[in-house]
């Protein structure tokens, strides 16, 4: 299936991967992967194609309403897990524990938490990475340039403001599918 993903991603859609193009070969077995900007449902299939192209197994979470039959079966096969956003359960702790339960676990999240324009990101992904002591790998959903720029693994420090400044800077001037929400 990787050849088909490459055909679609590179040839038919005209996308490219820049930056840390060896991140899948480094065999980082555990990571929090963040995708920004998340402005459209098109982001989903670009992300699925990207992971197939580089041969990297990743997981994701989504609102439980997405996981009803028949799409629920499809999303679960792709590595998705439903999450109850109304539950009082601490989601950061629950997801951080998943890293302990698996020898290999990478979760991909959109820190905006929505496809609409936001002024700041949700911080759960950051605290998940810190609790699990795993790196954050950033990648862009740059529809203007048709590219996914991938960062080197970044381990959060104890300086929240500096870490977020660094991450925001990685995404500076990147335009999503719907630029006004970028």
Image (cartoon, helix red, strand yellow):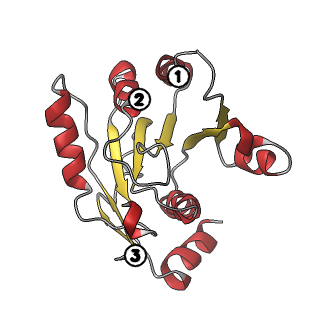
Residue at horizontal 76%, vertical 51%? 74
> Pointer 1 and pointer 2: residues touching (CB < 8 Å)?
yes
Q: Which mark is residue 146?
A: 3
**Left or right: 93, with 21 as reference point:** right
Instruction: Work out whether 34 lies above or below 85.
Output: below
Which residue is at a point 52% across and 24% down the rendered structure image? Answer: 95
The x, y position of residue 45, in whole percent, is: 59, 63
CA distance for labels 3 and 2? 28 Å
**Position of residue 92 measured from the top left corner of the image (x, y, whole percent):** 47, 22
Task: Give the vertical position of 92 relative to 72 (above or below).
Answer: above
Q: For marks 3 and 1, give the CA distance.
A: 33 Å
Disc 3 versus disc 2: nearer the observer:
2
The numbered mark, 1 or 2, whose residue comes first in the sequence reads 1
User: Which residue is under mark 1?
Assistant: 91
What numbered label is drawn on residue 27? none
Q: Which residue is mark 2?
A: 124
């Amino acid at each position: 299936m990787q050849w088909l993903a490459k055909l679609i991603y590179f040839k038919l859609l005209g996308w490219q991967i820049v930056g840390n193009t060896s991140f899948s070969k480094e065999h980082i077995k555990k990571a929090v992967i963040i995708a920004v900007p998340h402005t459209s449902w098109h982001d989903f299939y670009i992300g699925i194609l990207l992971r197939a192209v580089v041969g990297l197994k990743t997981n994701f979470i989504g609102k439980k309403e997405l996981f009803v039959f028949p799409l629920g079966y499809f999303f679960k096969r792709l590595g998705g897990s439903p999450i109850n956003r109304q539950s009082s359960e601490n989601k950061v702790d629950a997801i951080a524990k998943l890293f302990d339960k698996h020898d290999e676990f990478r979760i991909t999240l959109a820190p905006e938490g929505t496809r609409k324009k936001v002024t700041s990101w949700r911080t759960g992904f950051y605290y998940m990475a810190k609790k699990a002591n795993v790196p954050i790998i950033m990648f862009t959903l740059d529809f203007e340039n048709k590219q996914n720029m991938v960062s080197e693994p970044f381990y959060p420090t104890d300086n929240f403001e500096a870490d977020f400044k660094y991450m925001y800077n990685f995404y500076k001037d990147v335009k999503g599918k719907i630029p006004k929400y970028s």
